[in-house]
Image: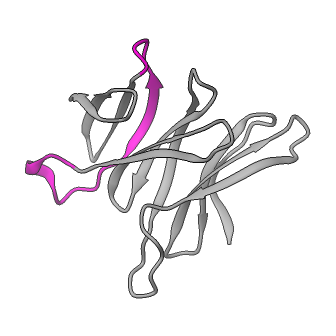
Amino acid sequence: MLPRNLHTNLGLTQYGAYGTAISYYGWLFKTDNMGNDVWSQTFATKPYSASRAEPSDEFSSVQQTNDGGYIIVGEASELGWLLKTDEMGKEIWSRSFEADKDNRDERHTFKSVQQTKDGGYILRGGRFGDDIVIKTDEKGFVKSK
């Protein structure tokens, strides 16, 4: 499997996707300042099944949180995806978001995330010009759209 959409900066936590032409998984890894692996984690919202070409889970943005962990956004099988990890990249919780009832046929993705002063998160994304902003609490539950 080859990395896809790999974002690299030595000494920082990295993110991207890896997989085959039909299936991608979210990939989070940390390197030291020499580029050596410190740890690596992969994430999927659904287990792979040969009968379908999913999961298609990809990260778009990662930010370190105030507690030393990471908050990650992207797309998970056509849904917006928000994932919280600890400082070693172990999943704490994961949330997925679908388009509103008027746009259910459209895919949904998040492109950026930022932790807010109250410990929650602001997510920005959308698809095909349908820009959305969602505010969540510290556990990823929606407070406002």
**Considering depth in this image, is 64 or 112 the residue closer to the camera?**
64
- Its colouring scheme is one colour
Q: Is residue 125 above or below residue 74?
A: above
Q: Is residue 114 rendered magenta in the image?
A: yes
Percent position (x, y) of residue 101?
9, 50
Q: In this view, does 95 lie above or below 121?
A: below
Identify the residue shown where x is 46% and y is 86%: 50
Point out the residue furthest to the right here.
34
Instruction: Give the x, y percent position of residue 121.
Output: 40, 26
The N terminus: image quadrant: bottom right
Classify the position of the C terminus by image quarter.
Answer: top left
Instruction: Give the residue furthest to the top.
Output: 117
Is 58 positioned to the left or the right of 67 in the image? left
19 left or right of 47?
Answer: right
- The structure residue drawn at horizontal position 69% and vertical position 42%, both measured from the top left corner, is 88
The region drawn magenta spans 99-119
5 lies above or below 85: below
Whole-percent x, y for residue 78 in the image: 33, 59
Q: Is residue 116 left or right of residue 79?
A: right
On screen, residue 22 above or below 96: below
Q: Give residue 58's position: percent from left, percent from top.
A: 50, 55
Q: Which residue lies furthest to the left in this view?
A: 102
Q: Quadrant of residue 140?
A: top left
